[in-house]
Image: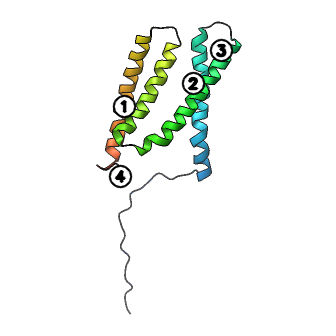
Amino acid sequence: MPRTPRTRRTPHTPRTPDIFDARTHQAARIGIPVVLGLVYGYWAAANRRGGGPITGWNVLFGFVTAIAFIVLCLAVATWAPLLKRELHSAVKSGFAGAAIGFLYAQTGQSVLRSVAIGTVVSAGIFAVFFYRYYTREDGEGNRIR
C-alpha cells in the first residue's frame, strides 16, 4: 500500500478573530471620529461658556469645533499610517496635544499654560505610539505579523 505524501504544516500563530465584517469596519472608520468630534465640540463649548447660559454663538462654536475636529481626525487617521513610524507617532501625538491644549485654552487660562499642557500630553502620547510602532514594525516600516 503506497503512502500518501504528508503536507507540511507551518507553525500557526493564533490571532484574535475578526468578528465584524468589512461594512462594520467602514462604518466605524467614519463613525468613531464623528462621535468623538461631537463630544469634543460639546466639551469645548462648555469650557468656553464657563457655566454661563447657553447662547446661539456658543452652540455655533461647538458645532464648528466639532466639524474641525472630525475633519482633522479623519485626515490624521487616513494619512498618518502612510508615514514612517517616527512621523506617524509625531502626527498623531501632535494632533492629540493640540486638541488638549485647545480645550484647556477655552477655560480662559493663559496661552503659555495651554501650550505647556499640550506639549506634555503630546510628548507622552508620542512615547507610547513610538514604542508601539517600533515593536510592531521591521526596519523598513512593514508590520510584523
- Which of the two discs, 4 and 3, labels the residue nearer the N terminus? 3
Q: Is residue 21 visible?
A: no
Identify which amino acid the numbered label 2 is placed on: Tyr
Q: Nearer the viewer, residue 137 or 141?
A: 141
Q: Is residue 114 left or right of residue 131?
A: right
Q: Is residue 3 left or right of residue 55?
A: left
Label 1: state its secondary structure. helix
Query: Residue under circle 4?
Result: 144
Q: Pinpoint residue 127: horizontal percent, then vertical percent.
A: 34, 31
Query: Residue under circle 3?
Result: 58
- Which of the two discs, 2 and 3, labels the residue nearer the N terminus? 2
Label 3: state its secondary structure. helix
Label 4: state its secondary structure. loop
Residue found at the far left of this picture: 139
- Which of the two discs, 1 and 2, labels the residue nearer the N terminus? 2
> Gap in Å between the C-alphas at discs 4 and 2?
34 Å
> Residue 40: which numbered mark, if any?
2
> Residue 126: which numbered mark, if any?
1
Q: Nearer the viewer, residue 142 or 13?
A: 142
Marks 4 and 3: CB-CB under 8 Å? Answer: no
Identify which amino acid the numbered label 4 is placed on: Ile
Residue at image point 39% right, 38% down: 88
Q: Pinpoint residue 142: horizontal percent, then vertical percent.
A: 36, 51
Residue at image point 35% right, 73% down: 8
Label 4 Cα neighbours within 10 Å, binned few <14 / some 14-19 / many ≥20: few
Residue at image point 38% right, 61% down: 12
- Which of the two discs, 4 and 2, labels the residue nearer the N terminus? 2
